[in-house]
Image (cartoon, helix red, strand yellow):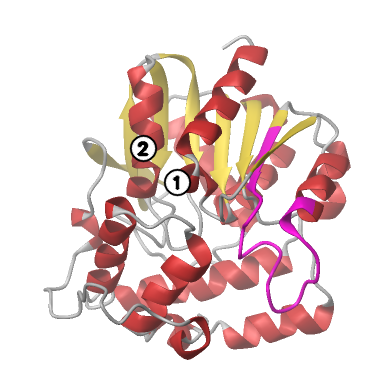
Amino acid sequence: MIPSSVLGIDGGAPRYGALPPLDPADLATPGPTRRVDVGGVAVNTFEREGRDPPLILIHGLSAYIGCWTPQIQRFTAQGRRVLALDLPGFGGSDRPDGPYSPPWYARLIARWLDAVGVAHGVVVGHSMGGQIAMRFALDHPERVDGLVLAAPAGIETFKPDAADWMRAFWTTERAEHATEDELRANFTKLAFNRTDEHVEALLCERVRMQKHPTWPATARAVSRCIAGMLDHPVRAELGGLHVPTLVVYGSDDRMIPNPVFTKGTTAAIAAEARRALPDARLTLLEGAGHYVQHDDPEGFHAAVEGFLRELGY
């Protein structure tokens, strides 16, 4: 978390700290969800029937199904089958004492798909979910009809000293005790380039969740997720990933590349993704940020829909 004193905050912004705690099981979703048992871990699941292959949505760090609401509404309105999960550690899913690494999540997602009766589909991952999606595709290429990577982690690499610093910085305690000002600054100065009612609703939910008894376990998951992404890079393996892939970045992503450790531009990281992935198409959406699917929904949806048409879907 970057301190609000560095990022700056809007002094006239709404305040949510006085609101009651929010149970993550009560987070807003785009439709009914159910908890699916996956080897003793309950995974909160959204599923809307439609034509196959399904779109399988994997959210990013500290996110949950509701962060995909505009995309779910768009794709289900087109008659597509859509599945989304709350990754364990987040949302309405369990918070087991696991490693929370991309390989761990990839194994769990394979078992989750088995449990819901899905053999394969088009996998869509945002940020950390993009790195998990790449890991899943590397481990289970027969289950991936296509891959959509929205501002994916895992393309940018870090020197050992930078990785060590991030592991040491992102402790469970730091994630657990982020202030509302720090959260607002990170939402509005880093994650999103366009703030609207949807972003305010997500921020409000986040502030309220931090007051709920489940939050320490969520903070533990955040810390382990960051360490897991650093400890299990995928960049060196991507040359073997022969899956049709769409990579979408926003040109003004303030999180990729890392603003502290990496010099360069998002466009350079995007170009690296195109070089690294043998069957990749690249879309760079001008002015969009890290939540590229939110900042330019029409551009994002057009890119995804064009990719699906190319695949015959």
Residue 93 appears in the picture as rendered:
no
The residue under label 2 is 70
Can residue 237 be seen here? The reply is: yes
Give the left or right position of residue 60, taking residue 280 as reference.
left
Q: Quadrant of residue 277?
A: top right
| Amino acid type of the residue that numbered disc 2 sits on in the rendered structure | Pro
Magenta part of the chain: 246-267
Judging by the rendered image, the residue that carries numbered circle 1 is: 294
Q: Position of residue 300 (x, y in %)?
A: 54, 35
In this view, the residue in front, 15 or 106, is 15
Helix, strand or loop for the magenta stretch, by majority: loop
Total numbered badges shown on the rendered structure: 2
Residue at (75% x, 77% y) in the render: 261
Query: What residue appears at the point 26 percent right and 44 percent down from the top-left corner?
Result: 29
User: Element at badge 1?
Assistant: helix
Q: Secondary structure at mark 2?
A: helix
